[in-house]
Amino acid sequence: MANSPASQPMLLENPLDGRATFPLSGEIVIEILRHASPFDVLSMRKTCRFICNVTRMRTVWINALERVCARHGVFKPTFPLQRMSILDLEYASLGPRRFLKMLNSIQGDESPLPYGNRELIFRRRPPLTGAYPCDGFYMATGGRFLLVYGEDDSLSLWDLGYNLRAPMKTYPVATLERSGELAAASQSFDGEGILLVTRQPTTDFEMDNLAVYEVRPTSDGRDSTFVKLAQLGLDGSPTLHDVRITPRVVSIRCGPLFFVWDWRINKGCRWSSSTLFNSPARAMTVLEGTILAYDEGGTVYNWDIPALQHLPILDLAHFPSIENEPKACIRPLVQHPEISVLIRCTASHRQNTEPALDPILCILYDDDSWNGPPERRTPMSLYSVREMGRGNEDPFIPNTLLLPAGSCDHAFGDRSERFYGAMTSLYRCEDNLVFCADTNDLSVVVTVMPTPLRATLRELPPAMLSRKLLPSDALHGELTTGVQLGFCPVSGRLAYRATDESFYLRDFISAPE
C-alpha cells in the first residue's frame, strides 16, 4: 500500500476531470482561490476530490506565490515561477507561515537549528584569481540576490539560489570594477531591478562624483550588467553623512544641509536645518515624498520633499537653495543626550496588493548610559505611514502623516539582551512585523509583533515574540561591532559578514525533497 498510486502526492497540471457533480467550474474555483491565502488553499484541499484536484494545479500556486511576493515586498526576479515545480511553488508560498511556526516551536532560550549553514567565498571569475572582499552588502528582499561592495572599489551581484536545493552560482552574475564606494541601494519602482548609488573618488581628470546605476538580474540566473543612469559632481569633496535612494530621488545630507536630486529629469534643491547641526551619520530615512532625520537628542523631524528645480549644472554646489522647515517631529521615548536612534520601515513603495498596505515605521532607541532594568533599555515605537499626496500645497499638513501605533519598553520582549548596533529592515510576515538585530552578547535576536490595526498610544500587546536566531556560541567569535545583517522571513534566510572575504548564510526553512 505504501507504494500504491493512492498514497503518492498528486501534483497535476490540469486536474479538472470529474466536474459533473460539482456546481462550479474549475475556472471559477481558481478565481476564488486567487483571493485565498496559501494556507486557506491547503485547507480547501480537504473539502472534496474536485477542489482537491484544483488546488494541485500549477496556476493556483503561481497566483498564490505572486500574491505572497507582492504582500511581502519580495524582489520580483527572486522566484523563477515558470520553471519551479508545483511543490516548489507551494513550499515558497508557505514560507512566511513556516518561518513563524518554526519560531513558535522554540522554547525558552533555545535557538533553531538551521537547515543550511554555509560560508560563502566570493570568487573572481577566471582568468582572475582570488576572491572579492566584502566590506558591505545589500540583500534584496527574498534572500536570493546579494550585492557585495569591496574596498578595492568593486561591486558584484551574486545569485544565492531561491532555496536550499537551488545552488549558489559559482561566480557573480554581474560585476562593476572601479565602481567607487557603495553609498545606498534600493529596489526599482517596478520591482525588477536594483538601484544603487556609488561615490567615485577623484582622478586626474575628474572630481568626486555620485553615480546612479541599475542592475536587473533575471529569475533564470543569466548574467546581468550594471547600467549607469546618471552622475552628479561633488565639487570640494564634501563629507556625506547620509545618502539614500528611492525609486524617484537620491537624498543626501551633509551635516545640516539636505539635498534632493531627481536624476531622471535633472532637477533638485537644497535646504539647511539648524536642528541637525551635530546630528550623527546615518540619521536620515526617506519615504515617499518625505525625509525623516533625527538630532543628537533623538527627536525625529519630518520634512516634505518640495517641488524640485531645474539644474543647469549637475554639481552639488550648484543646487538652488530654498526654505524648507520640518512640519512635524516625534520626541524620543527616553530623554538623554547620548541616545542613538534607528528608523526602519516596511516597503515604502506601493505593492500591487488588495487591499493596499500602508507602510509601518519602527523607531528603536538605544541608551548606552541606561543603568536601570535591562528590560527597559531598548524602547521602541511603531507608526502607521499615511501618505497625503506629493505636491500637497497646505503649509501645515505634511506629505506623510505618522500615526502612533503603539510602543514598548524593550524591543526584545521579555529578553534581557540589549541592542548592540545592527538592525535589519522591518518586514511583513503574514499578519506580523519582523526584524532582526544583534545584541550585547553577540547573538542575533528576531522579534515578531502583530501588525497594528488602529492608532494607539498604548503599549504594544504582549503577543510580541523574541527568539535568538543565532546564539553567541554559534558565531565562532566572528561577529564584531559594526556587523551588517541581511534577513528575509519569506525565505527564512539570514546573512551576515564574517570576515573581509567570507560570508555566512543560514537557512531556517527547508526546501522540498
Image (spheres, rainbow, N blue to C red):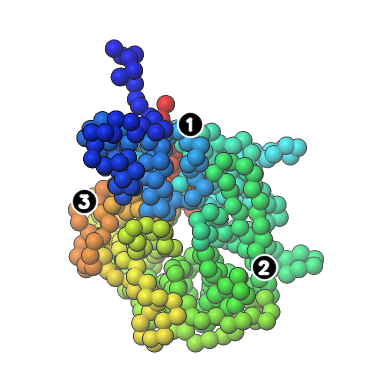
In depth, the one of 377 and 32 nearer the eye is: 32
Which of pointers 3 and 2 indicates the residue nearer the eye?
Answer: 2
Secondary element at image label 1: loop
Residue 318: which quarter of the image?
A: bottom right
Tell me what residue is drawn at x 30 percent, y 55 percent.
Answer: 411
For disc 1, the neighbor class at 10 Å (few under 14, some 14 to 19, many from 20) is few
Quarter occupied by the N terminus = top left
In depth, the one of 12 and 160 nearer the eye is: 12
Secondary element at image label 3: loop
Q: Label 1 sits on what residue type? A: Arg
For disc 3, the neighbor class at 10 Å (few under 14, some 14 to 19, many from 20) is few
Q: Is residue 368 visible?
A: no
Label pair 3/2, CB-CB below 8 angstroms: no
Look at mark 3 in the image and give the residue it sits on: 463
Which of pointers 3 and 1 indicates the residue nearer the eye?
Answer: 1
- Of callouts 3 and 2, the N-terminal one: 2
Q: Label 3 sits on what residue type? A: Ala
- Of callouts 1 and 2, the N-terminal one: 1
On the rendered structure, is 22 left or right of 347?
A: left
In depth, the one of 317 and 109 nearer the eye is: 317
Secondary element at image label 2: strand
For disc 2, the neighbor class at 10 Å (few under 14, some 14 to 19, many from 20) is some
Give the CA separation, mark 1 to mark 2.
40 Å
Tell me what residue is drawn at x 55 percent, y 80 percent.
Answer: 308
- Of callouts 3 and 1, the N-terminal one: 1
Quick check: 333 above or below 50? below
Picture coordinates of residue 326 (x, y %)? Answer: 41, 81
Q: Label 2 sits on what residue type? A: Gln
Which of pointers 1 and 2 indicates the residue nearer the eye?
Answer: 1
